[in-house]
Image (cartoon, helix red, strand yellow):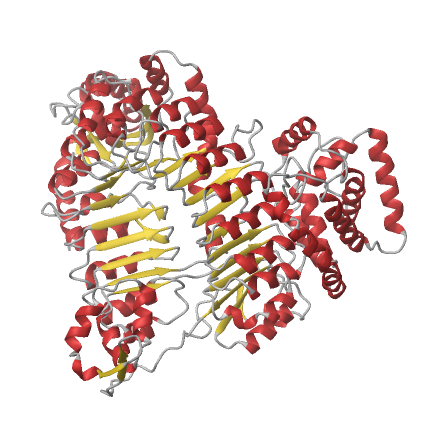
Amino acid sequence: MSVPRADDDAELDKLPVGMGSGAVWVTAAMFPEEVLEYVFSFVEADADRNAISLVCRGWYRIERRCRRRIFIGNCYSVSPEMALRRFPEVRAVVIKGKPHFADFNLVPSDWGGGADAWVESLAEACPQLEELRFKRMVVTDDCLELIGRSFRNFKVLSLVSCEGFSTAGLGYVAANCRNLRELDLLENDIEDNGIHWLSHFPESFTSLTSLNISSLDGEINFSVLERLVISCSKLKTLRLNHSVPLDRLANILCKAPHLVDLGTGRFSADFRLGLFEKLDSSFKACRNLKNLSGFYDAVPAYLPSIYSVCDGLISLNLSYATMRSAELIKLITQCKHLQRLWVMDLIEDAGLEAVASSCKLLDELRVFPIDPYAAEPVSLTERGLVAVSAGCPMFRSVLYFCRQMTNAALVTVAMNSPNLTCFRLCIIDPHTPDYLTQQPLDIGFGAVVKTCKNLSRLSLSGLLTDRVFETIGAHAHQVKMLSVAFAGDSDAGLHYILSGCRSLKKLEIRDCPFGDKALLANAAKLETMRSLWMSSCSVSLGACRLLAERMPRLNVEVIDERRGGPLESRPNDCPVEKLYIYRTLAGPRSDVPSCVWTV
Amino acid sequence: METEVGKKEDELPQLLDLISNEEDWFKGDVGRGDGHILGDLEEEKLELTLAPPGGEGREKLEKLSSALSSAGFSKIANSLYKNTVVGAQLVFFDSAKPNAEASGFQKDNFVPLPLPVTANFGKESSLEANMRMNQSHERGVHSAPEDGVLVKNRSQIRLTSSPVVGWPPVRSFRKNIAINSSKISDVLQNAGTLENRLRSETSNKGFFVKINVDGIPIGRKLNLNAYENYEMLSSVVEELFCGLLSESFYFTVSCTGMGEDAKRAFTGLLDGSGEYTLVYEDNEGDRMLVGDVPWDMFVSTAKRLRVMKNSELSTLFLGAVNKKRADEC
């Protein structure tokens, strides 16, 4: 996207207005800036805002001053100074750091993604900042302290899959963010240095509406938690962690029956007389409950206590509930209005068939493997997926781990659910073919891509040849994110992807025989994408050097943890272990660790 | 690699033919013999990758093939090819980069499968494994799959094969569930009444906290779950430390009647009437007097115990107040 110069000139641009045979030319002077600003304030989507800013210089100038939210998909794509110079009035910033494959330990821990630079710039330039959301970034305690100190009106802090901070930092946030509304701590690696940060919320604190501590490791002081729940009367979301047993939950629910989103803690308790009745009545009082999650170490005997809320549930996350299929079915079939279901493969095909017949509004399904390498595989196959696609007309998004698949099943799913927007299938053993025909799954995935015209996210698995990539390149017009593993035969595969896939923004590849030719032939494509990750492929250092030379606005990062000598001195035919390429306006970054080299 | 891409271009017409046949696939006639064409392609590609160094490789291939057939493990070899990470990785990866560094890198991911047919599977060179796979594939590509055998072999293999790094793509927060799951399934299987099940869960827990006494350098550990109230705790503490106290006194002041004094010292631990008082450190790091909260709450929040001299207690109290003030600054 080309960016017009950010200048302050008051040049009046002419805008064509009107359709049909005659166009009326109107000058910008006819619309005072305030009016335009007001109109723009109704436009929230980033893509639309970007489009507005491209109309003319005047609109660019007005739009940039009134943009309140920015989304930085790659923290290194632009420098904080540049971003904040353009959008000085920003109130909400969302930033993502490490590549997605960092979730699966493919990215070295010291790779980068530090939030310090961003928070420091924000502290200086945007004291009115209200919302910060970080994903896969390294956030230090100093950062958190700075946040607590610098932003008087700070309302929302969301840290997802981050690391680098401790309970001390959280304590600082709790103590100093007087207007905090949302605190979302999901799946972070938090150092526990004994400080019980939850008690750092002052007695007078009442503004919390959302608290997510579901994946926290440590113990929670129940009395502090209860005090918080009582004083924050507007609390809508509360997701507890494993340390909170059912009896405590019952107490809390009694005090917060207005919750909309609840994450139970441990769904078990030391034996207490009357606990079931207490839970039952607590849940009955929760008339607004729409989202339910948690269920750690679930004891099925307590499940009937939540039956009263099932009919109102829109989202149910049982992905940590290690219960058998029969018990899961009993619960889920009561949730007639369910739109989102996350569950473990313990549900089995039979369970999914029951879901398909009960949950007609189902939009999103995620099935996680309880134990990918179990000796006794769970009875979850392609049948379950087909059943859901057949029974749920609103089916749009799926993440499915299983062990076997057929082309026929995939074709059926595609035909049943042409509105799929997200299709992520993970067949656990790489290179698994269609188990009936022993053929690659090219036909099946091809059908998905051709039939589901709105497909925006796709993850492939199983035995796949270059053919499937040809189909994807030619038909996956809306796919923005593509994940490929253990697939393809040659460079042609990568070439098909990069020369097609008009909307592609994120491509991540591992263990595929894709190499230099395809990469170099499609160098220009890479600048239209956010990023490309390739690991265990066939790319040589020479190609990276060439690419970096040709494309100055790309950072070509070669990652090599084998410590076999300095990367700069290696010859051109040296194979590259991991490669991360992303477009950037900020040039090579200054915080590369020793295992990363920006070519 | 140049030749490979070239070959692909030659093969394109065949690929196009396959695609035009897709309509038939949609009509439900899935699983015809079209696999034949693909089989040929695969075979040709595999032949490309073979390229053994000199004649050495061929000899090894023959040795392997005879070993396999004599041991009657051809079916397992088939399924190995079709189902393992290792074999397929080698086939595809080797085709692109037949150099030392590549195979070295592969070995990092390469996990030996302890099946009888390949006692030194792990030490087998990637090239040998490649050829073995090829040989078994040639036999197996046109044979009809025998689901029963395949499935059985697959589960055998999976029992012992270790995962590749970062595969399957499951986040670490989800990975620990499996470890606990077998324990939980046992509990579920012992399904009795709700009470039984819950009782069995709680009895598994032991919650040991450290306990120190002022003046005694060595502490002890107590299982708080083993006691039901403060009285029991107090008497246990008395028993534990009585002996120790008299020992230390023995070294400093030798007195015969010291045992009784020591015993007397430990009475009144809870009500402040004796010389010592029982305090604990809770999960927030604060020092608290034992006895204020219900026993259950105490058990769930206590992290360590301390038996303090009453004289120390007052100075400590002042110290704690100062510490809190410092924190708030």
**Quadrant housing residue B62:** top right
Give the side of residue A477 with respect to residue B296, left or right: right
Q: Measured from the top left, where is residue B31 in percent x and y?
A: 67, 38
Q: Nearer the viewer, residue B286 or B33?
A: B33
Q: Nearer the viewer, residue B287 or A456?
A: A456
Please state, as top left, top right, bottom left or bottom right, where the C terminus of chain B lies in the image: bottom left
Q: Measured from the top left, where is residue A34 in percent x and y?
A: 15, 75
Q: Residue at x 53, y 43 (%)?
A: A426
Q: Nearer the viewer, residue A510 or A557?
A: A510
Q: Nearer the viewer, residue A294 or A2?
A: A2
Can see residue A540?
no
Q: Residue at x 42, y 34 (%)?
A: A391
**Quadrant housing residue A537:** bottom right
Q: Is residue B223 above or below residue A147?
A: above
Total number of numbered discs in the rendering: 0
**Quadrant housing residue B301:** top left
Q: Is residue B308 above or below residue B62?
A: above
Give the side of residue A352 with respect to residue A94, left or right: right
Can see residue A65?
yes
Q: Residue at x 79, y 39 (%)?
A: B136
Please state, as top left, top right, bottom left or bottom right, where the N terminus of chain B lies in the image: bottom right
